[in-house]
Amino acid sequence: MNALAPYLPDIWAAILAFAVLTYVVLDGFDLGVGILFPFLGSDDERTRAMNSVAPVWDGNETWLVMGGGGLLAVFPLAYGVILNALYVPIIVMLLALAFRGVAFEFRGKTQRWRPLWDKAFFGGSLVATLAQGAVLGGLLRGPEVTGRAFTGGPLDWVGPFSLGTALALVAGYVMLGAAWLVLKTSGELYDRARRIGQVALLATLGFIGLASIATPFLHPEYFRRWFVWPGITLSAVVPLLLLAAGIGYWRGIRSDRGLLAYLSGIAIFVLCFAGLGISIFPYIVPMSITIREAATSASSQGFILVGAVIFLPIILGYTAYAYYVFRGKVTEHGDHY
């Protein structure tokens, strides 16, 4: 373990980045399905949409717990700064996710109050997504840090850029949710999801374009990384890869290739996440605290890494198994899980 000590912060940064990205692409589609609820027409369509995510949605949120818990355990300084800077949207997100979970369970147990729980499920999904986007925007703007402590205000994250990232994440989750419904359903719901997915793709790419234009001007270091050699090469390559992923999604959503559309949607998120990493690495609190400055002792990192090495494959295994068991399309008259 001593030989690994200099690299432990990087290893843990990669693990946490993987956990956050996995959460986004997995929980993103079921949040997207929730946001789509008012546009799904009949109660039967909403029931089938919910049934398509019912077997896996709880497991998807495991990755959020892992990301937050890992940040606290391995990078406590960053955890303290980020939590103080983004306390409001983080708490709103957690409350919305809890409220959404209650609506998810109660909807299948009642007929009389089902319209109310439909609205609650939609509202919880939308608010949680907006809050996650606000967290991203607030983090990219860079919390005000003096020494080793957050010295800004509780609403510093509020601004046009955070609003833009929040709306972008809504469009992106709807894009994933529509692809998921194309993959998992048939009939009128399938056709409706295809139409919505095309609009969501264009909206997502539009927001990505706006964010790409705005981000370099948030901080001089962002500008340098993207528009000074050799970073400028990435400014050319990443948009081309995004265009390729967008074409893949468009072709998949317009034909009976839901898996292609869903995987292309994931590729769009992966590329955006890679762009985020290029912008801020090796900082964990942008342009204030690096991953090494935020990391706990090497012995603590090594001890926790042993647990991660044991349990991460288990989590990946049961996640893959759940998706395998519940593969295929949801029947038109399936019962609530």
Image: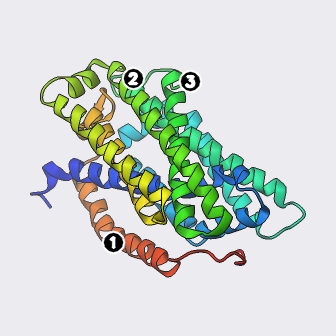
Residue to which mark 1 is pinned:
313
Looking at marks 3 and 1 on the same chain, the residue that comes earlier in the sequence is marked by 3
Looking at marks 2 and 1 on the same chain, the residue that comes earlier in the sequence is marked by 2
Looking at marks 3 and 2 on the same chain, the residue that comes earlier in the sequence is marked by 3
Q: What is the quadrant of the C terminus in the image?
A: bottom right
Callout 2: SS: helix
Q: Nearer the viewer, mark 2 or mark 1?
A: 2
Picture layout, residue 167 above or below residue 141: below
Residue at position x 30%, y 31% in the image: 289
Taking the view exactly as shown, the residue that stands out farthest to the right is 112
| Numbered circle sitting on residue 279 | none
Judging from the image, the colouring scheme is rainbow
Residue to which mark 3 is pinned:
155
Residue at position x 37%, y 43% in the image: 76
In the rendering, at what x and y percent does residue 276 appear?
33, 38
- Mark 1: amino acid: Pro
The image quarter containing residue 301 is bottom left
Picture layout, residue 191 above or below residue 123: below
Residue to which mark 2 is pinned:
214
